Image (tube, grey):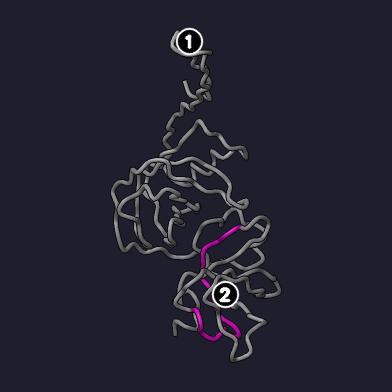
Amino acid sequence: AKGNYTSKLTNTSPDIAAPIEVNISAIDYAIEEVTNITALRAKWTGAIDATTYYKITGESLISFANGKNYYMQDAQSGLLVYDVNTMISPALATFDGVSGIVGKLELYNAMLELIITNPAAENITHNNTIAPVTVAADDYITNFNQYEGRLVKIENVAFPTANGTATFKTSAENLNVNSNGQDFIIRTFANTNYANEIIPTTSDVTGVAVLFNSTKQLSPRFKADISTFAT
C-alpha cells in the first residue's frame, strides 16, 4: 500500500565492537490515471501528496517549451510541467502534443506544477496549432484560476514605459501595463527574439498565464505574441 515507511537495520556481528544501526526510509507510491489536465487540476487538494503520482492519459499541447519547463494545456486548463531531472528524452518542443506523462503535483511560487517523475512520453505529435483564449484584462485578473498555465490574449495593452527608444531587455523583467483600466504585469522570458526591440506604446499581447506568488502575469513567448511586431 502507498505511504511513507521507515525501518531500522541492526548489525550485531561478533566481529564488531558494538551494534551498528542504520535507519531506512522509503516512499511507496501509486500512479493514478487522469484523462487530461483539467481532471488533474481537480485532484489538487492544496497539500502535497508524495505518495500519489499522476499519469495524464490524454493529449496535452505544449504552448511553450522553456528549458526544463513546459507550459501545457488541454481545451480548458493549463499547467506548468517541470522536468527537473531531464527525464523525458528527447526533449519536447513548443507546439508538440504528448500523452502518458507521469509526475507529482506541487506548488512553485503558488503556481501549480507537475514535476516529472518518469521518462514516459507517448504519442508525441508536432507542429500543433494552439489558439489563445482572448479575455479582457479585468476578467483575467479576477478569474485567473481559469487561465493559469494557458495561452491567453489580451487586447489593447498600453505600455507606460514606452518612449520610442526604450527596449525589451535580454533578461527577464516585469513591465507594468494597462488594458481598458485594468493594471497588470507583463513578465518577459529571458533571451527572447523580441529582446532589444523597442517597447510599443500599445499592442495586443498573447502569452502564458503565469502566477508568481500573488502576482498574476502574462508572459509573451516570442515576437509574434506582440501584435505590433507581427504586422
Q: How many numbered marks, from 0 up?
A: 2
Residue 115: x and y in percent read 47, 45
Residue 143: x and y in percent read 64, 56
**Displayed quadrant of residue 209:** bottom right
Q: Quadrant of the C terminus?
A: bottom left
Q: Which residue is mark 2?
A: 155
- In magenta, the rendered stretch is 195-211
Amino acid type of the residue that numbered disc 1 sits on in the rendered structure = Thr
Q: CA distance from mark 2 to mark 1?
A: 73 Å
Residue 135: x and y in percent read 57, 66
**Neighbour tally class for label 1: few under 14, some 14-19, many 20 plus, Cα within 10 Å:** few
Which residue appears at 47% of the width and 69% of the height? 221
**Displayed quadrant of residue 202:** bottom right
Asked whether 48 or 160 is in front, the reply is 48
Which residue appears at 55% of the width and 80% of the height? 168
Residue 69: x and y in percent read 46, 56
Q: Mark 2 against mark 1, which lies toward the viewer?
A: 1
Q: Earlier in the sequence, mark 2 or mark 1?
A: 1
Q: Which mark is residue 12?
A: 1
Amino acid type of the residue that numbered disc 2 sits on in the rendered structure = Glu
Magenta segment includes 44: no
